Amino acid sequence: MSELVVVEFIQRLRTIYTFMIIGYVLMSWLPNLRESFIGELLGKLVEPYLSVFRRIIPPIGGVLDLSPILAVFALQFVAAGLIAVITYFM
């Protein structure tokens, strides 16, 4: 029973953080949104994670940033691996 609760928790965190990344990326199309309270809050929560991937893949031409795609892929991969490990050992 506790295994199911932990797996559900990880899945919810993964979904919430994925939507936070997507929202933050969409806010880049309207720069004034990033200046709002929600934009700054999302920036503080998402930017440290995205900066890791920006070091791996810098923006192309200073405009096209592919790091969020890699970041979401890595988040999905790690969460799935963590769930697999939890279900295997519990």
Image (cartoon, grey):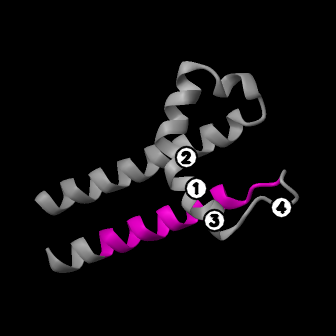
The answer to which of marks 1 and 4 sits earlier in the sequence is: 1
Earlier-in-chain disc, 4 versus 2: 2
Above or below for 71 versus 36:
below
Q: Label 2 near label 3: C-beta < 8 Å?
A: no
> In this rendering, would 41 be left or right of 55?
left
**Closer mark to the observer between disc 3 and disc 4:** 3
Residue 47 disc label:
2
Q: Amino acid at mark 1?
A: Ser
Circle 1 residue? 51
Tell me what residue is drawn at x 61 percent, y 44 percent: 22
Disc 3 element: helix
Q: As rendered, which of 68 and 48 lies closer to the eye?
A: 48
Please identify the quadrant where the C terminus is shown.
Answer: bottom left
Residue bearing mark 3: 55
Circles 3, 1 touching at the beta carbon (< 8 Å): yes
Q: Is residue 57 magenta?
A: no
**Placement of the N terminus among the 4 image quadrants:** bottom left
Q: Amino acid at mark 3?
A: Arg
Q: Residues within 10 Å of mark 2 (few under 14, many from 20)?
A: some
Q: Return the disc, 3 or 2, that comes first in the chain's sequence.
A: 2
Is residue 48 left or right of 31 when viewed as pictured? Answer: left
- Mark positioned earlier in the residue sequence (3 or 4): 3
The span shown in magenta is: 64-84
